[in-house]
Image (spheres, rainbow, N blue to C red):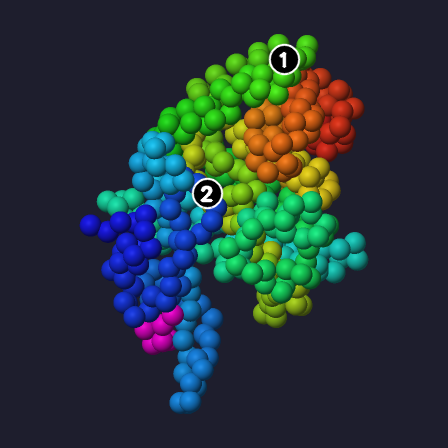
Amino acid sequence: MMDLTKEDGVLEWVKCLFPTDTVQSVTPLQGGSANFIWRVIIHAPIQVQLPFGLSNQHQPCNSSKPMSFTQTVSVIVKHAEGFVASNPSMKLYQSRIQDEVAAMTFASDKTISLLNPCPVLGQDHSLHATYTVKCPRILHFDDINSVFILQDAGLYSMNLKAFMSSYPSATVKADSNVPIDPIYTHFSPTSTQFHEAVGSGLGKFIARLHNTGRSLTQPELHKFINQPALALSNEILYARFETVLNSLGIASDLVTDGIDAVKWASKILLDGDAYQHASLCMGDFWPGNIIVDISSNHEPNSSDSHLQSEHVAIGLSIVDWELARVGPTPMDLGQFLAEAYSIHIYRCPVPVLVLSFQKAYLATLESRVFGCEDVKLCLIHMGVHLIVWGTCTGWFDAKDVTESRRLAMLGLGLVANAWNSNWKAIKESEFGELLNPFCTAAAQ
């Protein structure tokens, strides 16, 4: 039997699907710790038809013979076991991969994914960049072996957190699986156009996911109910709230409000589809699961006059959907905002990204389903995430207890103010106007 936790086993499995002599390499990827993830490079003569509709730009081969052409494509192979890949002693339900395939198949549809390039214009209305935001397409699923093949986001792609950490302007350099493509040196994470594209694109995408989920019939939506994901999300966040505060020696009058807020939010999370505006949620919407691919693009035949020139094309791919579930949508937003704010204070200022995300989300909602209770839940989730995860995931030196306490107090203040619907206090806090779009929506 093939061992899909090892390179040889993955190679054997892939060769059952592709012509044997076309599989060039199988390389393990860094990233998530729960699963085994590999990049597979396929190199084949143009006349060889590849499965799953795969194709790529034709590239000339170096040969003394008359020029021939080959096609080179890369795909991602993802395999789940009944344990955490980085810690085999920790058991984890293997059926999560079925939930992931179902959610990704749904989210890759054009009703949710932004497949057509969206322009980012300057003040003079000239084109600065375009962006797409998509859930990569599942190409093949082997449910017996709990493994699937996925579209690759790009050979030179990296996750958003790594991208924002990979330049001299960032405080910490991040590891990447591959060398940085030269195009990245001309479009840095400090670019306002990049911030606008990422914020607007992600806000639109997650709103379209929530919109489309709400448009489903109850039987259709029921297919995405994922109680294990709800329980796991609660266990790794809300259940750790008091423990983290105690470990940091946080003693504040705000703790009581924080505990009450967390009990309320935890119940809403575990109740799942009982939430008033419940829908399909991504479940783990953070920069580590947002893959950035930047290239120079030229679209002379585009029907959009804005795209009649060479420009930077930003591709965003949303991956790792195994925690997708039917539940309270504000938690998708709170998790992303917590991580985006961490980028803002620990990497480089991104006010445009944070504000564009909120504005695009609100503008894309099809009906008024984001009121005071939704904002309250979103910002409580954001604050708890800053406390539980922001203090231990590499934004700053883990030994810096002073900074851990400072961030925890900032998160606790946000939790308490959101719990008491004190939007004015949030605006007057360190967050300033960064959360203004959502706070304004709550006050209306």
Inspect this view and state whether residue 355 appears: no
- Of the residues shown, which amino acid type is indicated by label 2? Gly
The residue beneath circle 1 is 255
User: Residue 202: horizontal and vertical position, in percent?
Assistant: 58, 43
Q: Is residue 45 magenta?
A: yes
Image position of 308 (left or right of 54): right
Residue 313, label in figure:
none
Q: Could you tell me how many numbered marks the image carries? A: 2
Determine which of the numbered discs, if any, sits on residue 32 in the image: 2
Q: Is residue 385 above or below residue 188?
A: above
Residues in magenta?
43-48
Residue at the spot x=42%, y=69% of the render?
Answer: 72
Work out whether residue 293 can be spotted.
yes
Residue 104 falls left or right of residue 337: left
Circle 2: element type: loop
Residue 400 x %, y %:
66, 31
Q: Quadrant of the C terminus?
A: top right
